[in-house]
Image (cartoon, grey):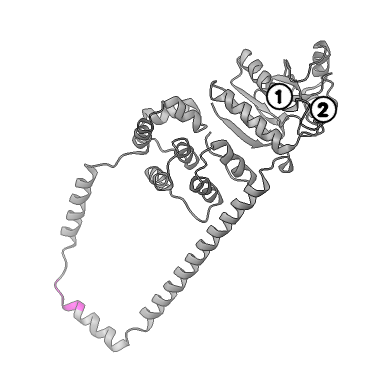
Amino acid sequence: MPLKLIRDDITRVSCDAIVNASDNELSGGGGVDAAIHKAAGPEMDEACRKLNGCPDGEARITKGYDLPCRYVIHTAGPVYVDGLHHEEQVLRNCYRNSLNLAKEYQCESVAFPLISAGVFGYPKEEALQTAISEITSFVMANDMLVYLVVFDQKVYQISTKLYVDIQQFIDEKYAAEHYDETSSARRRRHQQAKKKWSYPDAMGSAREAMYNQMPAYSYASREERAEESLEERLKVVDESFSEMLLRKIDEAGISDSDCYKKANIDRKLFSKIRSNRDYRPSKPTVLAFAIALELPLKETEEMLMKAGFALSSSSKFDIIVEYFIRHGNYDIFAINDALFAFDQPTLGV
C-alpha cells in the first residue's frame, strides 16, 4: 500500500493508529505529544504511566481513547545534537519499530508526524528524508496505508536548489503558454476583422444568389455515410488504458506488484484496473504508473491520452511532473515531495 503526504492536525486523522513523537517518560509534555494526550483524554496519561517509559528509538502502544483511531503508538525520537551521536539511526528505529508494532496489531493504516523535527531540533529536510526512506522500505514489502502528516507548511521543505529549479521551470512553461494564448487571440481578432471587411454588400449579395442557384445537397446521404463510417470505426477500438498498462508492465519485465508498489498505488485499485478493460483512472493515477514504468515524456503523454487526459502548461501539477520526467528522475516519493511543497495533489492513492 502507499505512502500519502497530507497537511492536517494528526489528532483529527481517522486511521487504525497514529504515532506520537514522545519523550522517554511518555509524559505528554509538549508539541505533538501534548496535543495527542489532550485529545485522547485523561485515560491516556494513566495508560502511559503504566508503560514505565520508552527508550530512544523504541515504541510502545496504547488505546486511542477519545481520538478517532484504535491505537496510539508512542515512540521516543532522538534529540538532535550534531548528527554524530547516532541520531539518524535512532530516528530510523523510531519509524521501523512503530511500523512493526502497527503490523503486529494488524493495523491497515497508520499516521506519523515528522518525528523529532520540532522541539527536538532535528534538521527538517534530513528528518523528512529519513522518514520517507524508512516508510517506503516498509510499504514496498507490506500492505499498509501510511500517512505522513505535516501540520505546518514551514516544517516541510524540499531543497532550496530543487525548489528554485522547479519554480523556474514552472515560470518558463507559464510564460510560453501565455505567449501562445496571446498570439492565438491576436490571430482570431485578425481573422474576424478580415471576415467583417472582406466583402462589400454588393459582392455578398451576388455570392448569396450564386449559392441559391446551386443544386440541393443530399444531407441524408451525408448522414448515412457518416453513420457507416462510425460503424466501421467502432469495429476497431483502440487499446484501452488498462491494456496499455498491462502491456507496458510485461515489456518492462516486472511483476504487477512491483509496478503498483513503485506507483504508490493500492493493491485493490490495481486489481480494479486489471480486471476492467474500460476502467477510467484519475490523472494522478495514470502519471503514477507512468513514473513507476519510467516512461519517457512521449509515452507518458500517450498513456494519458488513453485515459482521456493530456499534460498542460497551465497546470503546476503537470509542469512539476514533466520537470522530473525530463530530468530522468522517476523517484515517485521525490516527485510527491515537490508536489506537496507546491501545494499540489500527489501521485498514487
Camera-nearest label, 1 or 2: 1
Point out the tag, 1 or 2, that comes first from the N-terminus.
2
**Stretch of the chain drawn in magenta:** 211-215
Quarter of the view holding residue 303: top left
Residue 36 inside the magenta-drawn segment: no
Predominant SS along the magenta part: helix
Q: Nearer the viewer, residue 96 or 151?
A: 96
Identify the element where label 1 is drawn: helix
Quarter of the view holding residue 79: top right
User: Which residue is located at x 46 percent, y 73 percent?
Assistant: 186
Q: Residue furthest left?
A: 215
Residue 212 inside the magenta-drawn segment: yes
On the image, the x and y values in percent for residue 290 come to: 45, 39
User: Which residue is located at x 75 percent, y 37 percent?
Assistant: 123
Badge 1 local density, few (<14 within 10 Å), some, or many (20+)? few
On the image, the x and y values in percent for residue 315 come to: 53, 52
Identify the element where label 2 is drawn: helix
Q: Is residue 176 left or right of residue 6?
A: left
Residue beneath disc 1: 89
Question: Where is 184 relative to 76, above or below?
Answer: below
**Which kind of residue does numbered mark 2 sit on?**
Ala
User: Which residue is located at x 37 percent, y 84 percent?
Assistant: 197
Badge 2 local density, few (<14 within 10 Å), some, or many (20+)? some
On the image, the x and y values in percent for residue 346 come to: 56, 40
Question: Where is 228 relative to 245, above or below?
Answer: below
Q: Which mark is residue 34?
A: 2
Q: Which mark is residue 180?
A: none
Q: Nearer the viewer, residue 109 or 135?
A: 135
User: Which residue is located at x 49 percent, y 33 percent?
Assistant: 263
On the image, the x and y values in percent for residue 247 come to: 34, 33
User: Residues under labels 1 and 2: Cα distance?
Assistant: 25 Å
